[in-house]
Amino acid sequence: MTSTSSPEIQSTPNFGLIGLGKMGANMVRRLAKQGLRVAVFDQDAEVTSALATEVNAVACTSLANMVSQLAVPRVLWVMLPSGEVTEATLGQLQGLASPGDTLVDGANSNYKDSVRRAAHAEALGLHFMDAGVSGGVHGLANGYCLMVGGSTAALQAVQPYLEALAPGPTTGWLHAGPAGAGHFTKMIHNGIEYGMMAALAEGLSLLKAKKDFDIDLADVTELWRHGSVVRSWLLDLTAQTLQADQSLENIKAHVPDSGEGRWTANESIELGVPTPVMTLALMSRFASQGADDYASKLLAKMRQGFGGHAVGVV
């Protein structure tokens, strides 16, 4: 990864971000902190207006309005839930964009969709980049880990913004390969995340079950954070949870899966590569939907800690 100079700050930006949820809004804030002015659009006009005012961004009233207000060549970054809404939005942008513009899908999309979308975009003279984004609600302060796929031309257009979003210009982002490689890498990342979370949750559940030792889980997790081979950000988040409440009595033991774990398991079958830990971690999430076990409660709190995901209460 070679650092490039930041794009010139212009009154008319060439970068627009669509979808101002938890991740999208904080990405705009981080770009603003780096001195970059962008255009923003969300279906909720009040959200668009408020964020634009906060960071001096260009508020857009529609996708067409955004395209009309951006300098060319444009970079149009979509931060929406994967699936139909992302498909529809990228389809609209393909009809509005000009040859030489770059479309970026920052959702947790299936990499096979990214390969297909890239081929369609390139046929229209557009560039396409798939971007797996990790960092959750803490990305604003710490920077985002970005795994991207696409052509050299797409990378050249987007690289200054990757450098601004990442923890540093040369750290925290990777051009993983051609279109699809970014989302494929992020899919595997999330599969590993499932396994790591499950191991922590199951181990702590075992410690809690040994009643005659009365082991303090907050003390254990704080201990492990210093010098242990299992120290990690997930352990940090778990320690914070247990310091606040070890009983988790009011937490619902329901752990949703957002899709990447399923895709990872399917891919392991297609490639014939055994992934028992990641696959069993996915199965444990399925099992949690009807269980009331301590490990599932911890998993739910971990997801809330890094991604701001809602936690059910009882």
Image: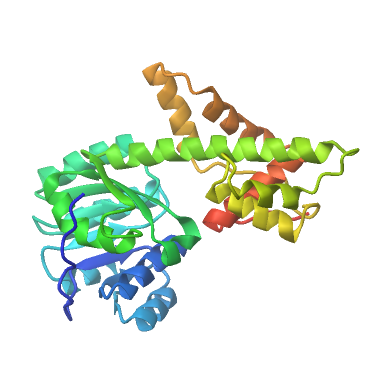
Residue drawn at the location 30% of the way across and 42% of the way down: 182
Picture quarter with the C terminus? bottom right
| Nearer the observer, 59 or 31 | 31
Q: Determine whether 280 is above or below 193 in the image.
A: above
Q: In the rendering, at what x and y percent does residue 210 appear?
A: 84, 36
**In the image, residue 175 lies at what x, y percent?**
24, 45
Q: Nearer the viewer, residue 205 or 236?
A: 236
The quarter of the picture where residue 283 lies is: top right
Using the image as rendered, state which of residue 250 and residue 2 is in the foreground.
Answer: 2
Front residue (pair 187, 214): 214
Q: Position of residue 117 (x, y in %)?
A: 24, 42
**The quadrant where residue 14 appears:** bottom left
* Point 38% across, 75% down: residue: 48
Q: Is residue 135 left or right of residue 18?
A: right
Q: Residue furthest top?
A: 272
Q: Residue 35: x, y in percent?
A: 27, 76
Q: Can residue 155 be spotted in the picture?
A: yes
Snapshot colouring:
rainbow
Q: Is residue 39 above or below residue 216?
A: below
- Confirm whether residue 309 shows in the render: no
Residue furthest toward the front?
227
Q: Is residue 226 left or right of residue 155?
A: right
Which residue occupies 31% across, 53% down?
A: 171
Residue at 72% from the left image edge and 54% from the top image edge:
242
Q: How many marks?
A: 0
